[in-house]
Image (spheres, rainbow, N blue to C red):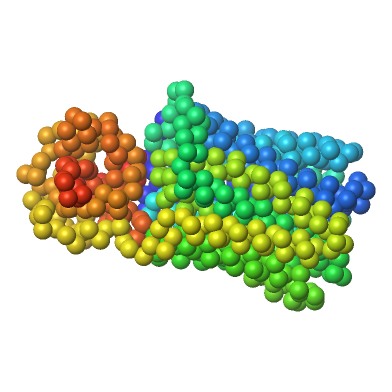
């Protein structure tokens, strides 16, 4: 059974956000805090830093590599059972890891089993958020990912306490119990409108995205970012202890990063919603700042200076993360977010797999983490440069500029621009593809089709000829967001094409914040 999408003021939207908030924190809050185990694993298993780094890297890489599987299963069965299964697998991985006697067993349990569970949790969760929220997508994404910062703040000192009290085995055992909380959180994910219950070919359909140059460049940029992004979360504790900081001071610095991360995510989400057409530009700027700070971080010698650098890094690192997900619908379109997110996570897994072991190898080679952090920052700067090559990064035009030209299509009925109502006419559905013309109080304007992003497909669009049916259903946008009033969004339906490159579009009021209710 499908349900309507969260609307402004809908309590279920709040429930969805809180559920996804907890799930994001349980996945990447755990990954970020795992650096607390790093010195313990090096000592217990008598292994080099590069070898121990593979534990976290394998978990991140498997999570991202198997994301297409998680997205495909979510398309076939819905997000709820997939996320529940992922929660069970992540908990079992931590549980089995607590009995490990060899380092490779940690690779299999944490990197393999828990990593696969994280893949089944994270991608369907983030896809549910980006598909469910349109008007405040960046802010909703930022709030959900804020869970990563909150859990990073809480888990680092908690795990340090558990290590000292129950040893690393007891800490992993208790961490497995915490991971089980993803199960009830997953149970709160209701099916979205249009979620299939029959055989789905979404996985194969998603591979077509690999033929699109813009999407490939975006994946390349995020992969480069991912290579350096997780390095401080794995090695910063060991770096600070090598500089003379105590274990609790190092854990506290990780908590400080978590607090700054929360502020960065909220600020970036708010800023992106103010100028949604510049989401890619903001993402590039935050990435560049994170890379610079990360490269300069080893210059901090004292604990206070390390703390200040950690605050700056945490804020910028937190700010760039929501942009990765908020910009994706603009790159591929809303209807392809789920397969695109799976492919993006799979491709960027190469960066996650390479980053921490490369950093550990450089540490073994040079004797400290100075070069490691410099190289990690360079990968982030490279990702920022690649993002600048994407279309419309510097675009400051509103996509509804053509609304100024209304001469060719005056309103044929009354339109209340404040309330968004139109003479109480029912919104169109996919079964109402015929019988609409300019005399039924529709509002016709001339627009440039290239300025309107395709959001989905209809079996029949209003006022289209038989040859035009099945074409894209465009969504009018202002500042990169759906043009909405207090009662709902306004949608455009293609009517006729003209030789001058313009096209008539019919404006219809629809109270849903998304096209999915009329597709």
| Left-right relation of 315 to 504 | right
Judging depth in this view, the residue of 285 and 13 nearest the camera is 285
Q: Is residue 113 above or below residue 440?
A: above
Please state, as top left, top right, bottom left or bottom right, where the C terminus lies in the image. top left
Task: Give percent across and percent down for residue 186.
Answer: 56, 39
| Left-right relation of 435 to 208 | left
Q: Is residue 289 above or below residue 100?
A: below
Asked if residue 335 shows in the view, the reply is: yes
Task: Give percent across and percent down for residue 341.
Answer: 52, 43
Question: What residue do we see at 65% from left, 41% from top?
Answer: 63
Task: Give percent across and percent down for residue 390.
Answer: 46, 55
Asked if residue 30 shows in the view, the reply is: no
Question: What residue do we see at 57% from left, 52% from top?
Answer: 222
Quarter of image, res 137:
bottom left
| Left-right relation of 499 to 311 | left
Question: What residue do we see at 60% from left, 59% from top?
Answer: 382
């Amino acid at each position: 059974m499908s349900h309507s999408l969260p609307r402004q003021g809908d309590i279920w939207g709040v429930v969805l956000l809180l559920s996804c908030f907890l799930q994001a924190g349980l996945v990447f809050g755990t990954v970020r805090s795992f650096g607390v185990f790093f010195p313990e694993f090096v000592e217990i298993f008598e292994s080099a830093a590069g070898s121990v780094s593979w534990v976290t890297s394998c978990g991140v890489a498997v999570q991202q590599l198997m994301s297409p599987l998680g997205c495909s299963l979510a398309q076939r069965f819905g997000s709820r059972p997939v996320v529940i299964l992922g929660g069970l697998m992540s908990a079992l991985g931590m549980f089995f890891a607590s009995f490990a006697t060899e380092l490779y067993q940690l690779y299999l349990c944490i990197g393999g089993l828990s990593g696969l569970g994280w893949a089944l949790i994270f991608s369907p969760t983030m896809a549910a958020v980006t598909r469910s929220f349109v008007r405040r997508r960046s802010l909703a994404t930022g709030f959900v990912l804020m869970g990563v910062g909150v859990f990073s703040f809480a888990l680092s000192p908690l795990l340090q306490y558990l290590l000292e009290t129950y040893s690393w085995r007891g800490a992993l055992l208790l961490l497995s119990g915490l991971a089980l909380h993803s199960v009830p959180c997953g149970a709160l994910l209701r099916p979205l409108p249009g979620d299939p219950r029959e055989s789905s070919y979404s996985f194969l359909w998603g591979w077509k995205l690999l033929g699109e140059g813009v999407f490939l460049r975006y994946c390349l940029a995020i992969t480069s970012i991912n290579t350096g992004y997780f390095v401080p979360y794995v090695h910063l504790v060991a770096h600070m202890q090598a500089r003379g900081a105590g274990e609790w001071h190092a854990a506290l610095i990780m908590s400080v990063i978590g607090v700054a991360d929360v502020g960065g995510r909220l600020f970036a989400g708010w800023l992106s919603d103010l100028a949604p057409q510049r989401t890619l530009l903001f993402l590039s700027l935050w990435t560049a700042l994170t890379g610079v700070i990360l490269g300069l971080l080893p210059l901090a010698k004292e604990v206070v200076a390390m703390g200040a650098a950690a605050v700056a890094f945490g804020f910028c690192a937190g700010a760039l993360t929501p942009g990765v997900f908020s910009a994706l619908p603009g790159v591929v379109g809303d209807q392809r977010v789920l397969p695109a997110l799976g492919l993006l996570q799979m491709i960027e897994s190469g960066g996650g797999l390479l980053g921490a072991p490369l950093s550990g190898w450089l540490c073994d080679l040079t004797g400290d983490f100075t070069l490691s952090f410099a190289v990690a920052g360079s990968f982030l700067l490279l990702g920022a440069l690649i993002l600048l090559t994407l279309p419309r990064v510097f675009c400051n035009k509103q996509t509804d500029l053509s609304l100024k030209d209304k001469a060719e299509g005056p309103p044929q009925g009354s339109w209340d621009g404040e309330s968004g109502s139109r003479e109480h006419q029912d919104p169109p559905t996919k079964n109402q593809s015929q019988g609409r013309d300019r005399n039924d109080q529709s509002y016709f304007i001339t627009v440039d089709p290239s300025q309107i992003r395709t959001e989905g497909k209809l079996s029949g669009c209003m006022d289209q000829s038989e040859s035009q049916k099945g074409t894209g259903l465009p969504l009018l946008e202002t500042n990169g967001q759906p043009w909405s009033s207090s009662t709902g969004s306004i949608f455009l339906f293609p009517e006729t094409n003209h030789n001058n490159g313009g096209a008539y579009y019919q404006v219809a009021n629809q109270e849903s914040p998304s096209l999915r209710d009329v597709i």
